[in-house]
């Protein structure tokens, strides 16, 4: 495995990470905290968040961490989370997400859970945070290679007519990424100095991830059995690298897409990634934007 990228000194930065208690969000938090950033960990379980805080502090004793309550499956919780932030933010990592559900499930407001939680709720969160984004702030949405083969169905975004779990996951990630590009375009047009972009982790699994007691505990045997897969799969520690790079790395610009630079963007250190035309399509992005406002009832005016 290549060495972890070296981060700049982040002592003056504050980053909000959603889903910071597990997986990629946990490792993004650990990496940011190790470089000196203050991290606001937005999590839906206080108990799991506390375990993650303990795991970070075991490695970074002086880590500056705050836990926020956030359930993306409830827009009231999303609004309350945004209101609870009382510091300026240099980056927001919109990471939390579900990759499947057993049958079609819904949020508290009746939206399909993956489209509503992974995609729509994150944009609502960013709208709620708009006036706390510092000059030059980066909003980073976490996409997926699944969006390569998952154009959204604008006539059935909530999968009411036809639900297939993996397809809906891919569509939620396409929407997440398309909304990031749309936000960046809108900010540029309005002359705002915040930027939005997307990043994806390639293919990252717990079994190849180094142990963090209380957070992720793959058995040594499973880790060694999985080792040959490393050509095409990586741990979530490495999967977090492109996400962290998009948040704080050098040479990053609004509207970009970052991912692992290795074979098929599945593994490797951060590099520019390619978003498919259906993800970058401007008209689709604008229709998604309108759909978020309609479906959530949340005004996106604060995002200009
Ligand atoms: N791993 C990959 O190969 C891969 C590839 C492409 C994209 N991604 C994306 O990367 C992101 C993180 O994936 P991961 O592999 O790290 O998954 P993970 O290990 O399952 O972690 C998911 C995180 O999201 C949180 N979460 C889920 N639903 C939530 C909700 N309603 N409200 C608040 N938080 C919620 C989870 O909290 P709990 O612990 O409370 O459940 C957990 O912290 C996802 O957006 C996923 O789509 C992952």
Image (tube, rainbow, N blue to C red):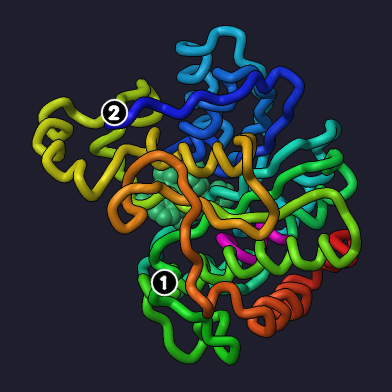
Judge whether residue 118 is colored magenta: yes
User: The magenta stretch spans which residues?
Assistant: 117-123
Residue extending farthest top: 61
Q: Residue at x 67, y 39 (%)?
A: 69
- Using the image as rendered, state which of residue 262 and residue 210 is in the foreground: 262
- Which is closer to the viewer, label 2 or label 1? 1
> Is the residue 13 above or below the residue 253 in the image?
above
The residue labelled by disc 1 is: 148
Give whichever of discs 2 and 1 has the lower sequence position.
1
Left or right: residue 34 versus residue 124 is: left
Q: Is residue 248 visible?
A: yes
> Is the residue 201 above or below the residue 206 in the image?
below
Residue 71: image x %, image y %? 62, 50
Left or right: residue 289 versus residue 44 is: right
The residue labelled by disc 2 is: 217
- The secondary structure type at the circle numbered 2 is loop
- Using the image as rendered, state which of residue 112 and residue 191 is in the foreground: 191
């Amino acid at each position: 495995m290549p060495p972890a990228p070296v981060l700049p000194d982040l002592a003056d930065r504050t980053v909000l990470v959603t889903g910071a208690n597990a997986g990629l969000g946990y490792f993004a938090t650990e990496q940011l905290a190790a470089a000196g950033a203050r991290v606001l960990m937005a999590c839906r379980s206080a108990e799991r968040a506390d375990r993650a805080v303990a795991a970070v502090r075991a490695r970074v004793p002086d880590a500056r961490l705050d836990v926020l309550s956030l359930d993306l499956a409830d827009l009231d919780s999303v609004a309350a989370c945004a209101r609870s932030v009382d510091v300026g933010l240099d980056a927001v990592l919109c990471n939390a997400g579900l990759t499947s559900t057993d049958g079609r499930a819904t949020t508290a407001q009746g939206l399909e859970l993956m489209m509503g939680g992974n995609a729509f709720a994150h944009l609502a969160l960013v709208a709620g945070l708009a006036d706390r984004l510092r000059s030059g702030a980066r909003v980073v949405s976490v996409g997926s290679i699944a969006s390569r083969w998952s154009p959204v169905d604008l006539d059935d975004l909530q999968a009411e007519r036809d639900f297939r779990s993996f397809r809906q996951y891919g569509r939620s990630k396409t929407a997440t990424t398309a909304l990031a590009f749309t936000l960046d375009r809108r900010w540029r047009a309005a002359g705002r100095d915040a930027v939005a972009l997307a990043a994806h982790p390639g293919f990252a699994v717990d079994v190849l991830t180094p142990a963090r007691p209380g957070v992720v505990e793959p058995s040594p045997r499973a880790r060694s059995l999985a080792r040959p897969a490393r050509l095409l799969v990586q741990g979530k520690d490495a999967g977090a690298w492109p996400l962290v790079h998009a948040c704080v790395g050098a040479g990053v610009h609004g509207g970009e897409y970052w991912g692992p630079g290795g074979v098929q963007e599945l593994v490797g250190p951060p590099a520019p990634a390619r978003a498919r035309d259906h993800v970058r399509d401007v008209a689709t992005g604008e229709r998604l934007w309108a759909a978020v406002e309609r479906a959530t009832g949340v005004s996106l005016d604060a995002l200009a």
